[in-house]
Image (cartoon, rainbow, N blue to C red):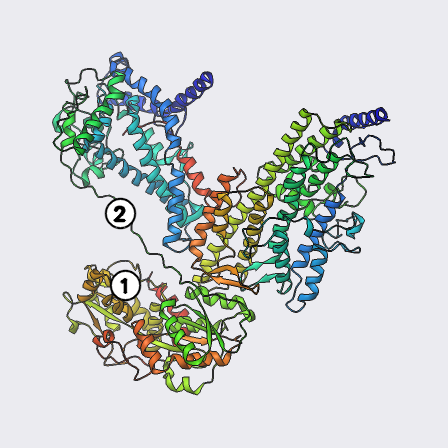
Amino acid sequence: MKSTNYIAASLLGALACGSPAWADVYGPFPITLKGYDGDKTDSTAYTGQAARQLLHNSLKKLAAQGDGSNAEAIKAQMMMYFAGKDEGREILDPQSKDGFTVAQTMVDEISKGNELKSKAYGGLVNGWPGKMTSAEVLEFMIDKAAATSGGFDPLTGYDYQQLISKFAMGAVFYNQGVDNYLDEGLARDNKPNDQPYSEGRHYTGKEHVWDEAFGYFGAPAHALTLDAEQAYGIAKGADMSVADYDKDGKVDLYREMTYAHGYYAADADKSGTNYLHTIVRAFLDGRNLITSAAGEALTDAQHAELMGYADVIKSNWEKVIAEAAFKYAGSVYKDLQKLQIIIESNGDATEAFRDYTKHWGELKGFAMALEAGGKDLGDVGVRMNRLIGYGPVLLGGGQVTGIDDSGNYVTGGDQDMGNYMVHMLKLQHLLGESFALEGRKNDATEEMDGLVESLGEGLAAEND
Amino acid sequence: MSELAAQGWLGDWAAQFLDPRKRLYWGYLASAFLIALAWMVLLRRERPASAVRKLLSRDIWCSPSARADYAIFLINTILMGSIVPRLLGHAAVAAFCFSLLHGLFEGRASLLPAAPAWAIAAGFTLVLFVLDDLARYVIHRLMHRLPVLWAFHKVHHSATRLNPLTVLRTHPVEGVLFALRGALVQGLCIGVFVYAFGDRVSLVMVLGANAVKLVFNVLGANLRHSEVPIRYWPWLEKIFLSPAQHQVHHSVERRHHDRNFGVVLSCWDRLFGTFHHSEPDQALRYGLGNSVAEPHSLHTLYLAPFRESAMHIARLLVPGSRARPRAPLAQSDQSSKASHSMKPIRTLKFYSVLAVTLASVAAFPPPLLAADMVNIYSARKEELILPLLERFREETGIGFRLVTGKADGLLKRIEIEGEATPADVFITVDAGRLQRAKQAGILQPVENAVIEERIPAHLRDVDNQWFGLSRRARVIFYARDRVDPSELSTYEDLANEKWRGRLCIRSSNNIYNQSLVASMIAHLGEEATEEWARGLVANFARNPAGGDTDQLLALAAGQCDITLVNTYYFGRMLNSSDESERAAGEGIGVFWPNQDGRGAHVNVSGAGITRHTRHLEAAQALLEFLVNDESQAWYAEVNNEYPVVPGAEVSDTLRSFGEFQSDTLNLTVLGENNTAALQLMDRAGWR
């Protein structure tokens, strides 16, 4: 029996390697589990993660649907996607539209009984007032968002749609990926490769651990066949032809969609970095390595190699989030500059303030996500949180400084808009240096670097 | 490692000749050679072959001095390669200045938004060049002036034969100082320009090099360190230093010492008294004189300066110490340069502007719906309003929440918060701003007999959407020692040409000036006011800058003789804890204009009740409280202002200004005429 499976695995492996197209696609992978006698032929499985990606997308959609009078109803719906396990949840995003047909309309079509809440990072969230865990923060935000009109609170400048989405991506997907599956999940004696993941499963422990991490990252299985623009465009529903890899006329939301961090990796890569391919390549190489173990426990050498791939994924995943925070810090800086001009000229600041708070929500969500990876960022985390504060600086000055016993925000402080611009400059510097960022979109001091470069002051001690 | 390092060094050495940003780029060397050849053949009537032989003479290029130049070039490139990256860099200085400016000017400036990028680039390139050239002059002069530095700079002057590579005959310590100089000056330029002009800033480049430097280099910069004494016409040498002038700088002759420190421009030398024309047929001897034993040995060039410098430091630290530099380069003709007296160098002064800090904001839970509560958004600082609000709470039992912030930002904030705003009362300064709040639709009309009875009609909105709480007059202040008050009469008279170059005033961006002009429009009509504004602008002693206090200080400092300032600024000055400010105030007199006519222009700080208030009664109670006699006296006194309620007590300081008749124009007009006033000031050239 063992040898039969081994031969089957080898044959499938050889077949996979012989076909250039499939060599760059994450799955299907052969069954390697020893003793498996069922009729499954593909050991790849990350449906639960894909379902959670859809729960997140739908939650984000709902976060903006309050109108100020339907708080209870909206909150109940949001909680259904955040903490519920009920069947019958519709996929609110993505949905089919002209020129872009998706294969599933209900979350259950991919996987049943999944939720986000229990998977959220269990540590305290330093970047948000109230000393709460990430699940508590998300529930708190959901409660507040439901009471707003369009997910936006003009009194605090909170854009809950952005805050909830970006932080949930970090607290659930990033945390589960790097702190659970690519960390404890890879321990030698945890979920070993010579055992099924759990009783009755057709895949081994390590195979599934690896697949789950991949599912949380959010890249389409064929990401390596796409360039950054194409991978990014899939999430926007832009080009059906590049999304529909198996050419069945529909975009499979399990395997062919770009989600969450996969989307932000592609976004960064549009400007020249290579995070998406680096991460997906490491996932694919790691999965091929596990497959090549053919259902045996990993050797020391194989385990060490696998940990190497995990490190590549973890460090680049972190950079993807840090690049996004860097980009939005730059946006916030530019928005403040614009607001300053509008205020001085007594113009209409409504739209500019809305843009500013949206970008701030994204910045804050990503910054909080960086701390949800289970890794202690030390003074970088402290400095980052102090520079951003708990809320965007409001027109005229001041920002949210805390939450009182009744759960109401407390605003105050002496932060003004000009000084907050300096905070954004310092934040970009901090992120750029601490995470060795290369993309650096919206770099507020980019022009200066260019000028320094053009001066070409060099090594010569030239006299006068 | 050694092979890799050697490859790196080779690249660094080669870069000096292959990079157009470097002085020794082969193209510049070639142009220098051709210029020298042409000069010798065409002007000196030498035969080409002879000229070439002279230019490439072994006596120069293979001299011990030149061989030391080559060795220093090779060694320094390696040394500086490991030192420079560890020094304070341009980027760090630029980022520091860039950030600092945000704090000083409260955010980001966008100057000359209509100016094209090419003009900004040209301006940047030019300013960078001039500042860099000046900084080079200053540092160079210090190198000669201070014995501690001269010990290192001597290495450069120890060259006895000059060739283009002599430019790199520099001690590494001096190299470090040059690198820091470049980082500071260029970093400052970059930081300031990018702050003010954003992505329109670039360096004008030709062939990948700074265009100005390229021109300098193509025109024979390398001949400065050569023995080809090319001179310019005397008038041109007064603008640009000729190669022969720099050769004079290297001359051993005592009369040439401490001359021509500049690089490109000779204006610095002329300005600071170190200029020296080149001399016809000058045949100069270079170096440090005969006393130097082995001027070209590496030991002398690299180590001796440390010892000599240490001796100088020891002498400084222990006065009377007998320690004397004994290094080979120590006692020379040139060393006397270090003891030459030097006029004080005017260094750049960086002015600090105090950033206005927002007052702290009290705790603010949103659902403040309790009936006995009023929420105030105030553009006045906390200390100027809080004691009064506490008194209000004591007397009425109505609580309050106070948010303080910048006037224009708070107004926008209430607009954006819309129906959700917790603000019940908005307090701000200037009728123009109060009118903006009314126009933005964030206030509501209030029918309240007490308030209407106490506040004169002209000091509140015609629709009772806002009410003045304190008055300030914008009047004439003059220097007691230079102006006889009998010369003063009206605002209109300030346009009289007798005040030409004697008036200080802040910019037209300022709402106080806008409101004054708005009142003039109401009284004189737009045409006459514009003519007046033109006359006023013609009388400016300087471009408008700073706040009202700065105008008073400028007056005290003698920069102008008269100014227009709000009365409370003068009150603050007289009550300042800073003795020098109080002293400055003593030399200033206040003059009430238009006393035989409409009276002095007054404006108000004021308040209105917001359109979406949920505490209308409490808000009205607060306004009533603010206009009772006691509140009026206190509020006016802490702000150095006049009460709006007739008969309320005036502070001693203000009483000392004397009685005056004020303009009773309804202040609503100031807001209504605001746009016209702004356009008019712009047309009149009031910046």
Q: Is residue B285 above or below residue B187?
A: above
Position of residue B137 measured from the top left corner of the image (x, y, whole percent): 24, 36
Kindly identify which chain the residue marked by label 1 belongs to.
B
In which quadrant will I find the C terminus of chain A?
top left
In which quadrant will I find the N terminus of chain A?
top right
- Badge 2 crowding class, 10 Å Cα cut-off, few under 14, some 14 to 19, many 20 or more, is few
Give the residue at mark 1.
B549
Count of marks, rendered view: 2
Residue sitting at x 51%, y 43%:
A378
Give the residue at mark 2.
B349
Question: Between marks 1 and 2, how big is the CA–CA gap?
Answer: 21 Å
- The picture quadrant where one finds residue A293 is top right
Residue sitting at x 78%, y 29%:
A295
Say whether residue B256 is visible. Answer: yes
Please state which amino acid type lies under the numbered disc 1. Answer: Thr
Residue B27 located left or right of residue A375: left
Please state which amino acid type lies under the numbered disc 2. Answer: Lys
Position of residue B70 measured from the top left corner of the image (x, y, whole percent): 31, 18
Q: Earlier in the sequence, mark 1 or mark 2?
A: 2
Position of residue A62 measured from the top left corner of the image (x, y, whole percent): 68, 58
